[in-house]
Amino acid sequence: MRLKDKEVIYYETIDSTQFEAWRLGSAGKIESGTIIVADIQTAGIGTHGRTWITDEKDNIAASIYFKPNCEIEIIKNITIEIAEKIVSILQPFIGVELNIKEPNDLYWNGKKLGRNIS
């Protein structure tokens, strides 16, 4: 599958989208900007090395493989900057205050977005 000239690789189940991005990237099998997506992730990596497991009903796991053409120091805060941009775009439309928990989690009313918050 392609998304705006970027490849999207889909798996029903995988150990970790991040591990797969590293495996494919290290082997030179994907290009910068490739998105790895899975319904179920059995050994994902969360913040501070915590395990991040998803199930088939309530989650989606995704990693984007980037091979920057600049010094890493220049983009070290990119995840928080992306979260800030998403908040600035969404807030005017949804009319509620969103908060960010580093490195890039969006929260509304004390609950993480992207989860079932009912």
Image (cartoon, rainbow, N blue to C red):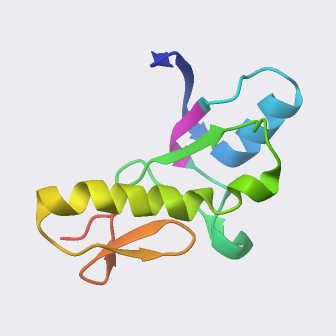
Question: Is residue 38 found inside the magenta-colored segment of the image?
Answer: yes
Q: Nearer the viewer, residue 6 or 93?
A: 93
Residue 28 image point, x, y percent? 85, 22
What secondary structure do most residues of the magenta stretch adopt? Answer: strand
Place residue 27 in its image quadrant: top right
Describe residue 71's horizontal placement relative to residue 3 as left or right. right
User: In this view, which residue lies farthest toward the right?
Assistant: 27
Describe residue 101's horizontal placement relative to residue 32 as left or right. left
- Count the numbered circles shown: 0
Q: Nearer the viewer, residue 25 or 61?
A: 25
Residue 25 image point, x, y percent? 80, 31
111 up-or-down from 29: above or below: below
What residue is at 78 percent from the left and 35 percent from the top?
Answer: 69
86 up-or-down from 98: above or below: above
Describe residue 104's horizontal placement relative to residue 98 as left or right. right
56 up-or-down from 24: above or below: below
Q: Is residue 15 visible?
A: no
30 up-or-down from 88: above or below: above
Residue 105 image point, x, y percent? 46, 68
Describe residue 36's horizontal placement relative to residue 75 as left or right. left
Instruction: Tell me which segment is drawn in magenta.
Output: 35-40
Residue 72 image point, x, y percent? 80, 52
**Which quadrant holds the C terminus?**
bottom left
Q: Is residue 49 visible?
A: yes
What residue is at 28 percent from the left and 73 percent from the top?
Answer: 98
Place residue 6 in its image quadrant: top right
Question: Is residue 37 found inside the magenta-colored segment of the image?
Answer: yes
